[in-house]
Amino acid sequence: MSRTAAHCIFCDLIQGAAEVSVCYEDSQAIAFMDVQPVNSGHVLVVPRDHYESLCDVPPNVAMHLFDVSMRLAPIIRDVSGCGDMNLVVNSGEAAGQNVFHYHVHLIPRRNDDGFDIPLPFPGSQMPDRTFLDAMAARIIAALRDPARRLGKLAAAS
């Protein structure tokens, strides 16, 4: 587990210290209604254990949260009456994370709801193909680097 924050509202909710509208729970995860929803039906899928960000979550927990999200998504679409859905993870302050307990947003969407995640980003320009190829090669090399894998395994134990 990641270091536990001095105060984590999600840990409080999971421990029953405040009201929460739970729509799913099991031994590893809990899903509840967002109190500041984009649209009705906006759900947060949260690990019961405290992990601060995407980099802290063990792969098996992350996969479980994604599985829970995939099981909830069609139900949320039906119940909310929204045909579309964003599945969003904000990991880190620069990415918009404001509760530092890892979580997945399931956001039912309507065409006119005013919420926007503009991709492609209007301020970006297409990089030169050699830059894209070089970045891809760096990622491939990092994936194959046994020292990186050993470092990850040592950190996890």
Image (spheres, grey):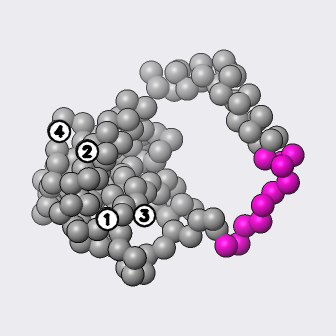
Kind of residue indicated by mark 4: Asp
* Label 1 CA crowd tier, 10 Å (few <14, some 14–19, many 20+): few
Which of discs 2 and 3 lies nearer the camera? The answer is: 2
SS assignment at label 3: loop
Mark 1 and mark 2: Cα distance apart in space: 15 Å
Quadrant in which residue 44 is drawn? bottom left
Is 131 one of the magenta-colored residues?
yes
Locate the C terminus and report the quarter of the image it occupies.
Answer: top left
Whichever of labels 4 and 2 marks the residue nearer the N terminus, that label is: 4
Mark 4 and mark 3: Cα distance apart in space: 25 Å
Which residue is the site of mark 3? 98
Which residue is the site of mark 1? 83
Instruction: Tell me, for residue 26, which label it has, or none.
Output: 4
Which of discs 1 and 3 lies nearer the camera? The answer is: 1
Q: Is residue 31 left or right of residue 63?
A: left
Kind of residue indicated by mark 1: Gly
Are dots 2 and 3 in contact, CB under 8 Å?
no
x and y percent of residue 127 in the render?
A: 81, 57
SS assignment at label 4: loop
Q: Is residue 117 left or right of residue 149?
A: left
Which residue is the site of mark 2? 71
* Label 2 CA crowd tier, 10 Å (few <14, some 14–19, many 20+): few
Identify the residue shown where x is 44% and y is 54%.
89
Identify the residue shown where x is 46% and y is 47%.
53
Mark 2 and mark 3: Cα distance apart in space: 25 Å
Locate the N terminus and report the quarter of the image it occupies.
Answer: top left
Are dots 1 and 2 in contact, CB under 8 Å?
no
Whichever of labels 1 and 3 marks the residue nearer the N terminus, that label is: 1
Q: Which residues are magenta?
A: 122-132
Can residue 11 be seen here? The reply is: no
